[in-house]
Amino acid sequence: MAKYWGEFNDAQKMYVAGSFFQFTSGGWSQLKGYDLSQSSGKTEEKKNPLANLLGKKDEEAAGAEEEKGLFVVSGVKASKPPPDASPLRTMQAELWEEKALLPDERRLCCERLYQQYQGCPTAEAGAVVLAAVKELAPLYETLSPMVKVLPVPIRACLAANLAPALAREGADKARMAAALKEGLGLDTPQEAFWKPVGSLTSKLIAEDKIWLLLDFVPFFATPEAEAKLKHFPEVLNATQAAVKATVPDLSESDVQLLAVDLAVTDYLGTATDDAGISPRLDMNGFLPWVKELAPYQLREVLEERKAFSASSRPKKEEKK
């Protein structure tokens, strides 16, 4: 850096100096800048402020500056939060030195985890969310090949919502990471699950496919939970057929969205179980129930699902 410093213009020097503060862990406060150049702050008694600091003559100080100017920046580095700090502050501190996440990713993930924490019904559930911050770095390592495909808000949404499932006691993290890679297309998908599900959801938009990953990956935490996915492709296919028969004028993308919402929510039962996963209806009870739904009921479910997708979609931040 010293070799090229003299060749930098003012803007480049400011960028480098600012980067030292931006990318060091913890953040800074009370930032101040001082211009100690030979031409600044001259007085009759001592023309050069550097001479005041170093106790040198004006000529010696000027030589030390080499006519390049001297600028000093000072600040107070943030300290680790105390034990009684807010959960958000604690989670942010956990990621201060984490290189796998960019500053914006750290902020977005912590904000999403904090929202989940605020909605936890018990102290035990809250503890799982707090522990989930340690699962973010491994998740981002898994997601690293998707940097050019998934924008920052989508990656943060996926990581922050999957992390608590990884933090649960007894979760098979390696198996869940492998399932995530298969679901993202980074590894060869399972013939019995990911491949048929991918075919049956091919018309969904990217955000809805991300939500499917959030629904499915936690099932791979234990062999018992994974076994509940065995018949899902078959159930999803039959659900799509039932939806088409009842509401034949729906587009293929709407059929897929409605069918997968019904199958995930009412067959797998992911909407009602925070601690574990247990289906509400078995296949023999679920499919007849779907066939009995009236067209207006299916349309209502579809509109609710679309509204959910729109409300949960990460908003683009305004450029400053």
Image (cartoon, rainbow, N blue to C red):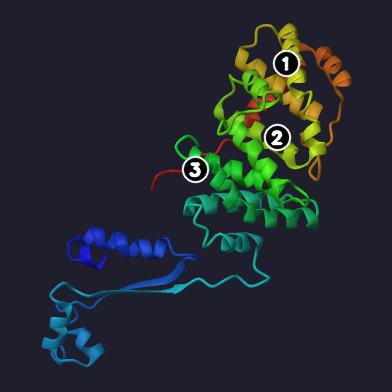
Q: Residue at x 51, y 62 (%)?
A: 97
What is the three-letter code of the residue carrying label 1? Asn
- Kindly report the distance in space between the C-alpha atoms of the residues bearing marks 1 and 3: 33 Å
Q: Locate residue 284, reporting x and y percent.
A: 88, 19
Q: Determine contact: label 1, label 2, CB under 8 Å.
A: no
**Badge 3 density bin: few <14, some 14–19, many ≥20, Cα 10 Å:** some
Q: Locate residue 73, reporting x and y percent.
A: 33, 73
- Kindly report the distance in space between the C-alpha atoms of the residues bearing marks 3 and 2: 20 Å
Q: Residue at x 69, y 57 (%)?
A: 131
- Quarter holding the N terminus? bottom left
Residue assigned mark 3:
152
Q: Locate residue 266, reporting x and y percent.
A: 80, 27
Earlier residue among tags 1 and 2: 2
What is the three-letter code of the residue carrying label 2? Asp
Earlier residue among tags 3 and 2: 3
Q: Quadrant of residue 281?
A: top right
Q: Residue at x 56, y 59 (%)?
A: 95
Q: Determine contact: label 3, label 2, CB under 8 Å.
A: no
Q: Given the current orientation, which residue lies at the most extreme left position?
A: 59
User: Is residue 310 shown to the viewer in this render?
Assistant: no
Which secondary structure lies at badge 1?
A: helix
- Kindly report the distance in space between the C-alpha atoms of the residues bearing marks 1 and 2: 17 Å
Near-viewer residue (38 or 256):
256
Q: Quadrant of residue 62?
A: bottom left
What label does residue 215 carry, if any?
2
Residue assigned mark 1:
237
Q: Locate residue 90, reporting x and y percent.
A: 62, 63
Which secondary structure lies at badge 2?
A: helix
Earlier residue among tags 1 and 3: 3
Q: Nearer the viewer, mark 1 or mark 3?
A: 1
